[in-house]
Amino acid sequence: MSAYIVLSPWDLALASLFILLNAGLSLALRLGLERQLLIAAARMVLQLLLVGLVLKVVFAAASPWLTALVATVMIAFAGREIRARQERRHKGLWGYGLGAAAMTFSGTLITVFALTTQIQPAPWWSPQYALPLFGMILGNTMTGVSLGLDSLHSLVDRERRAIEAQLLLGETSLTALLPALRRALRSGFTPIINSMAATGVVALPGMMTGQILSGADPQEAVKYQLLIMFLIGGATGLGVLAAVLASAWRLSDNRHRLRLDRLSDPG
Amino acid sequence: MFEISDIRTPLIGPVSLSIAAGECVSLRGPSGSGKSLLLRAIADLDPNDGDVLLDRQSRNRVPAPQWRRLVAMVPAESGWWTDTVADHFKPGPETAALLEALDLPHALDWKVSRLSTGEKQRLALARALQNAPRVLLLDEPTSALDDQATIRVEDLLRRQLKREVTILLVTHDEAQARRLAGRHFLLDKGRLAPEKDPVA
């Protein structure tokens, strides 16, 4: 396969003209988005340049501890993002810890599984493989986990009377919460199912496209993409299940009450 | 004997009260005085301190679901978890008799979405009575009912009293309190006091 075509800074500057064009359109149409758009674009440039630098250093250092540290920072950001995406979230440490713990559990399990049994780089934790893989798994699991939690919390709030009616008739909290639990799990799973169904027909996945652009054989790129999609599907399933079940457990207590007081107020 | 002993939450109490089997006690008080919260605490639906005993057995020694079958609370606004009334009832002759007594003999064929507030109120009571509770905690059980339906509900409650069921009745309706209850209490700012002269 041919080597990939190196992009010059001028190529990137030329491509960024379209962002400037969008900002100009926003100004002309008085959409008021130009500032936001330019700031977002500038943030993206800065963040990616920094990530590029950090990854270069981490790859060169080839240290398991440094790799684990970067993975921990990624989880910390993902936990913060999950927390921010919920309208009503658990109060205190639970609000942050629930999402982060579910991601740590499912993301780490699936990444280590893939690294040790399928990709098998030497050493298995090799940052060049471990970190991009972990990042892709985390990014997708995060969407499922935050949707699942957000959906559970708004459902129990909205269906409070129905849940408490069952509790008052002598049902257990598990039975009373089960309909909301099922719906929350469904909303957590839906994005990955939709994404799998549309992949290759509607959208060519970014990772596969990247590999093809950098000169990889399309069939090899497809194999990698399939592997990634299976891993993402598995991690999302485990992550959503862990987060939603743990949240439901926290939303009830040993006297089978509905503990909405453990959720923050909306907004 | 049903004994409420030093029940407290951040907003109510301490409240203590003993009610004999087959006795109805009324509880009145201004809106926001904590009447519904007190019933929720007795049913152990909100975190609370203190104890409640039924025939000297503490609720803390009984699993919460079992406690709520023995001590049934019917809130002022009922909740429904599917859209079919029948899903909320156990089929059987007892259910049919209860619905007949409340003048809702065909309710099991209905959708929850077509129920009026009054129908929901009566069905919620019937639903709670299916478990044959020993104690009924009723929060404004006839607030949305016309006179005819109120008479039916009160008759049903009298029959429960004859079966030695204990009733704690929260009501704004002073006349109803007089008709059903032998003792009357007032809850104000979370504190319980005997009503001085409910008949006046």
Image: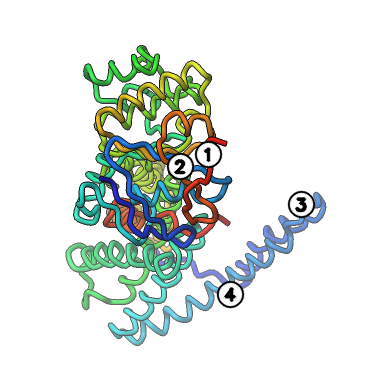
- Return the chain for callout 2: B
Instruction: Name which of mark 4 and mark 3 comes first in the sequence.
Output: 3
Is residue A241 positioned above or below A126 on the image?
above
Asked if the residue at tag 2 contacts the one at tag 1, i.e. Cβ–Cβ closer than 8 Å, the answer is: yes
**Distance (Cα) linking label 2 and label 4:** 72 Å
Q: Residue furthest top?
A: B106
Residue B97 or residue B158, whichever sits in front: B158
The percent coordinates of residue B114 (x first, y second) are 48, 20
Is residue B45 positioned above or below A90 on the image?
above
Q: Residues within 10 Å of mark 2 (few under 14, many from 20)?
A: many
Any part of residue B184 in sight: yes
Horizontal side of B101 relative to A6 (left or right) equals: left
Residue type at mark 3 is Leu
Q: Please tell me which residue is depicted at 28% across the width and 43% down the height of the picture.
A: B68
Q: Please tell me which residue is depicted at 31% across the width and 24% down the height of the picture.
A: B159
Q: Identify the mark at residue B198; answer none if there is no mark.
A: 1
Q: Identify the mark at residue A31; answer none if there is no mark.
A: 3
**Callout in the foreground (2, 4):** 2
**Callout in the foreground (1, 4):** 1
Q: Which residue is mark 4?
A: A46
Q: Identify the mark at residue B184; answer none if there is no mark.
A: 2
**Distance (Cα) linking label 3 and label 2:** 65 Å
